Image (spheres, rainbow, N blue to C red):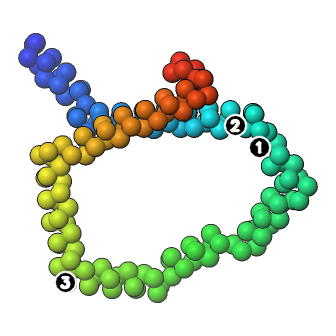
Amino acid sequence: DDEVDALLDELKEPTQQEAAVQKLKESTLKLGSALQNVSTDIDSKLGVSQKARNVDTNLGISATVGSFLGKLQIRQRAYDVANSEAVKSISDTVNDTLEKTGVKSAVVDGTQKIKSLDDEHKISSSTADVIAGGVEWVANGLNSVVGKSKDQED
């Protein structure tokens, strides 16, 4: 029973890569919060948002741009082009060419070799850990500029 419980506990433990990705996510959230703190601090001191709203109200920029973009119907036009027979035909031709020339299989083989190298040397996990540490350091520095401690972060 103890052995089974130990094995189940091992299964619940995140892999090194999962832990590194989680650490990177947390650091990124801290950086986002720190950037929000800094921008809020700057805005409160300089009144940037209010000044921008006043300019927009006086000149009607938002209404003009919104109307203009609505008339262009960019989203629908892009969708129509992406789903056109010409684009589908080009995509099929390119895919067939990649298949026939062996490029596709070379890419798959190269991808597998890179994955094996990463599995062996834990490059992506190590890199994510280092980046997470750097991001957290920047976030802490930004928060210290505006006088926010870790407990005060959003």
Q: Position of residue 136 (x, y in %)?
A: 43, 33
Cα distance in 3D space between marks 2 and 3: 56 Å
**Residue, x 25% and y 46% (percent of image)?**
124
Q: Quadrant of residue 42?
A: top right
Confirm whether residue 29 shows in the render.
no
Question: Which quadrant would the C terminus be assigned to in this image?
Answer: top right
Q: Earlier in the sequence, mark 3 or mark 1?
A: 1
Is there a contact, CB below 8 Å, between mark 2 and mark 3?
Answer: no
What amino acid is at disc 1? Val
Reading the image, the residue beneath label 1 is 48
Reading the image, the residue beneath label 3 is 101
Cα distance in 3D space between marks 1 and 2: 8 Å
What amino acid is at disc 2? Ile
| 91 left or right, relative to 78 | left
**Residue, x 39% and y 37% (percent of image)?**
134
Q: Toward the viewer: 37 or 78?
A: 37
Task: Assess disc 3: are there few (<14), some (14-19) or many (≥20) residues with their C-alpha within 10 Å of its C-alpha.
Answer: few
Quick one: which residue is furthest to the right in this view? 58
Single out the mark in the foreground, 2 or 3: 2
Reading the image, the residue beneath label 2 is 42
**Residue, x 17% and y 25% (percent of image)?**
10
Q: Earlier in the sequence, mark 1 or mark 2?
A: 2
**Residue, x 54% and y 33% (percent of image)?**
142
Q: Position of residue 9 (x, y in %)?
A: 19, 21
Single out the mark in the foreground, 3 or 1: 1
Cα distance in 3D space between marks 3 and 1: 57 Å
What amino acid is at disc 3? Thr
Is there a contact, CB below 8 Å, between mark 1 and mark 2?
Answer: yes
| 56 left or right, relative to 29 | right
What element does badge 3 sit on?
Answer: helix
Task: Assess disc 2: are there few (<14), some (14-19) or many (≥20) residues with their C-alpha within 10 Å of its C-alpha.
Answer: few
